[in-house]
């Protein structure tokens, strides 16, 4: 069903959208899976949770839809990395980066992933049973360690205490900018020196300093013929004319990996541990599978296909709490979606958070049921589930993220069960990713 809001309805809706986007878009699409909303200055927002229409925007007519203006504030941190760049410049970057995430390369990162998880579990063990940890913070630190070890051959664990708050400052500023009414009215509002932006600039300088240090140290110790990690591959990469990437291009890609490569997986794991605490039957099946497949040894890349329930648990968690909760595109030319006109310049939002809850494609859409993702489960529309996006801009690191999440969850499950602290109600924050707004404090229970 489709609906067009009147100007008066839109005025009532916009404050709710700024205050709590998840509640706003969920209530608006409860009875309609396609809604057009008039915005100030003649702009339009088109919102859809129908996979068929998602396919039109992200696949069928993807040349007509560029990254929406809401991504522009991210360029302050990420420059023109894969997440923010456009057109032929983006296509050249994608051709350079894609081979770096081939299956054989990804599998080679597995030992570093498991080692990082083992170190984190040793630290938890030293805290003692009954201790409380915030798994949102813990998973962020763990996945940052993985990024450092696997992609940069560097130990970032010591810098996690400073990098975590720096990323938090940047993401908080992003939320304030895109939710401010002036963002829709002033093209360069994200560059205004507001207090939040000034704080974010200092955090951005710190993060860029970390990345610049990695690049400088690596140039001093070149890899030779054998590439060790993504950083080596970027430094060795050549464009279509045989020229190496300049310093800014290398930095932009590393900044993108640093943010997207740990933030998304950290959130996926944190929400997964919360859901397992709330669904003890699913957790016990997970424990049984991990014990059966691994028999006490460390997980490897070869175990990925055997840990079917582990993978299904993570997939179902990302259905309910997709790390990339919103995908927005801007129409270059006028289009039409199921009879609703899409004028040029309109923003078309295809939020996975809603697509993953579309009742026409997901029975009991609010329920947690990993069986949906087991072999032999009923088929679904190919874009009814898009935790890593869709079309040619689908996340290049999706395979890396899934391997990492499965191996980390299996390693955690070998050593601990975690229970949500009674009375705490985690809340979701819609930033660049879907993050826990108030933490997820959980009690450690060592196994065995």
Image (tube, rainbow, N blue to C red):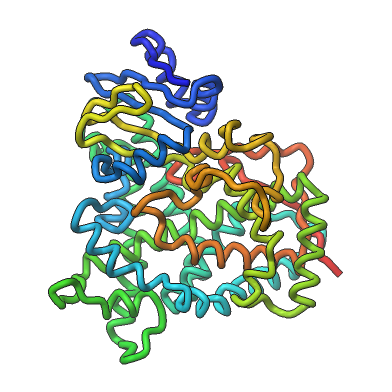
Q: Quadrant of residue 96?
A: bottom left
Image point (43%, 13%), residue name: 12
Residue 439 in the figure: left or right of residue 159 = right
Residue 214 in the figure: left or right of residue 374 = left
Q: In the image shown, does 311 or 444 lie closer to the viewer? A: 311
Image point (67%, 50%), residue name: 377
Whether residue 176 is visible to the viewer of this picture, yes or no, is yes
Q: Position of residue 140 (x, y in %)?
A: 55, 58
Whether residue 162 is visible to the viewer of this picture, yes or no, is no
Q: Indicate whether 34 appears above or below 203.
A: above
Q: Position of residue 16 (x, y in %)?
A: 47, 21
Image point (42%, 17%), residue name: 3
Q: Indicate whether 23 appears above or below 320.
A: above
Q: Residue furthest top?
A: 8
Q: Indicate whether 240 appears above or below 62.
A: below
Q: In the image shown, does 42 or 221 lie closer to the viewer? A: 42
Q: Residue furthest bottom?
A: 225
Q: Position of residue 159 (x, y in %)?
A: 47, 67
Image point (24%, 57%), residue name: 90
Residue 393 in the figure: left or right of residue 273 = left
Count of marks overlaid on the render? 0
Q: Quadrant of the C terminus?
A: bottom right
Q: Position of residue 276 (x, y in %)?
A: 73, 50
């Amino acid at each position: 069903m489709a609906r067009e809001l009147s100007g008066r309805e839109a005025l009532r809706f916009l404050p709710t959208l700024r205050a709590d986007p998840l509640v706003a878009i969920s209530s608006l699409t409860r009875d309609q899976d396609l809604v057009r909303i008039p915005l100030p200055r003649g702009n339009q927002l088109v919102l859809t949770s129908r996979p068929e229409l998602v396919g039109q925007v992200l696949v069928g007519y993807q040349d007509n839809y560029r990254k929406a203006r809401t991504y522009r504030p991210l360029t302050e941190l990420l420059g023109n990395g894969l997440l923010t760049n456009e057109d032929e410049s983006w296509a050249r970057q994608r051709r350079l980066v894609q081979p770096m995430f081939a299956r054989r390369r990804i599998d080679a990162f597995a030992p570093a992933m498991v080692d990082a998880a083992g170190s984190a579990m040793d630290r938890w063990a030293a805290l003692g049973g009954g201790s409380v940890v915030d798994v949102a913070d813990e998973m962020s630190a763990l996945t940052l360690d993985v990024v450092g070890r696997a992609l940069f051959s560097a130990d970032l664990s010591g810098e996690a205490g400073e990098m975590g708050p720096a990323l938090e400052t940047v993401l908080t500023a992003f939320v304030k900018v895109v939710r401010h009414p002036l963002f829709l009215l002033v093209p360069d509002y994200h560059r205004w020196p507001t207090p939040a932006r000034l704080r974010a600039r200092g955090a951005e300088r710190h993060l860029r300093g970390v990345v610049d240090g990695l690049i400088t140290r690596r140039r001093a110790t070149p890899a030779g013929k054998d590439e060790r990690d993504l950083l080596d591959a970027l430094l060795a990469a050549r464009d279509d004319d045989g020229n190496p990437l300049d310093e800014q291009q290398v930095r932009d890609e590393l900044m993108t990996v640093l943010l997207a490569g740990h933030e998304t997986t950290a959130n996926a794991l944190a929400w997964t541990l919360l859901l397992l605490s709330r669904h003890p039957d699913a957790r016990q099946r997970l424990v049984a599978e991990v014990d059966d497949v691994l028999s006490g040894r460390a997980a490897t890349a070869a175990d990925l296909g055997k840990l079917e329930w582990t993978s299904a648990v993570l997939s179902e968690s990302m259905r309910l709490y997709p790390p990339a909760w919103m995908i927005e595109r801007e129409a270059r030319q006028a289009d039409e979606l199921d009879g609703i006109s899409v004028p040029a310049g309109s923003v078309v939002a295809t939020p996975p958070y809603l697509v993953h809850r579309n009742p026409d494609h997901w029975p009991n859409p609010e329920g947690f049921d990993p069986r949906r993702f087991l072999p032999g489960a009923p088929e679904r529309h190919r874009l009814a589930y898009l935790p890593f996006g869709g079309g040619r801009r689908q996340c290049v690191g999706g395979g890396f993220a899934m391997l990492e999440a499965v191996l980390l969850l299996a390693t955690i499950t070998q050593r601990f069960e975690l229970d949500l602290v009674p009375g705490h109600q985690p809340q979701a924050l819609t930033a660049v990713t879907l993050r826990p707004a108030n933490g997820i404090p959980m009690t450690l229970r060592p196994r065995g």
